[in-house]
Amino acid sequence: MVNMETVAPCGLYCGVCGIYQATVTNDAELKAKFARAYGVPAETLTCLGCRSNQVFEYCKVCGIKSCAAEKDLEGCHLCADFPCDKVEAFPVPEGKLNILRAVPRWRELGTERWVAEEAKLFSCKSCGNQMFRGAKKCRKCSTLAG
């Protein structure tokens, strides 16, 4: 069963987000890394998923999330306008590339199979540890990502 709190409307599955993983594992080192990257205090870096009641401050104000809510859609995979200007204007280039990759797969597979595929895509090929999107190496066994 999919935890819908981790299914972001934009197609960036929260289960493989470093901020989400740092929150659920309470990994202080990982929190500090992302806090530096986003320019926020580490103690404020927290997220339990885009649809949860504890959302990272950048994701709270996401135009894609607001658009899906206004259209009463689960996500961009159900929108006839995808990709749109909100996706094109996504502020993180790597995130935008992942959205453009993931949303068509979400359309094709449906939510449950898509989430499983995203989790597998960002799992360590050596030890199976769940990695986060953009990780360079596995935090468990140090195997390089890719």
Image (cartoon, rainbow, N blue to C red):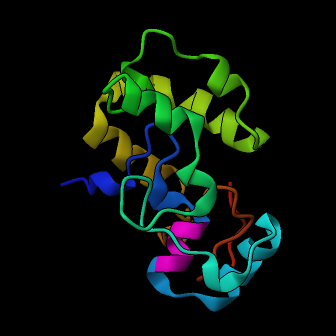
Instruction: Name the residue rendered at 81%, 69% in the picture.
Output: 39
Q: In the image, is residue 46 above or below residue 117?
A: below
Left or right relative to 61: residue 8: left
Queried whether the magenta region covers residue 78, the answer comes back as no
Left or right relative to 41: residue 106: left
Residue 36 placement (x, y as % from top left): 81, 74
Residue range highlighted in magenta: 19-23
Residue 132 placement (x, y as % from top left): 59, 63
Query: Closest to the observer: 79 or 135?
Result: 79
Query: Closest to the observer: 43 or 80?
Result: 43
Q: Quadrant of residue 46?
A: bottom right
Query: Closest to the observer: 67 or 128?
Result: 67
Counting every numbered tag in the picture gives 0
Residue 118 placement (x, y as % from top left): 45, 47
Q: Does any portion of residue 115 appear in the rendered image? A: yes
Q: Quadrant of the C terminus?
A: bottom right
Q: Quadrant of the N terminus?
A: bottom left
Left or right relative to 103: residue 59: right
Q: Does any portion of residue 132 appear in the rendered image? A: no
Q: Quadrant of residue 48?
A: bottom left
Instruction: Name the residue rendered at 39%, 27% in the picture.
Output: 70
Which residue lies most toward the left here? Answer: 1
Residue 74 placement (x, y as % from top left): 32, 33
Q: In the image, is residue 144 above or below residue 31?
A: above
Instruction: Name the residue rendered at 42%, 29% in the picture.
Output: 68
Instruction: Name the residue rendered at 58%, 17% in the picture.
Output: 83
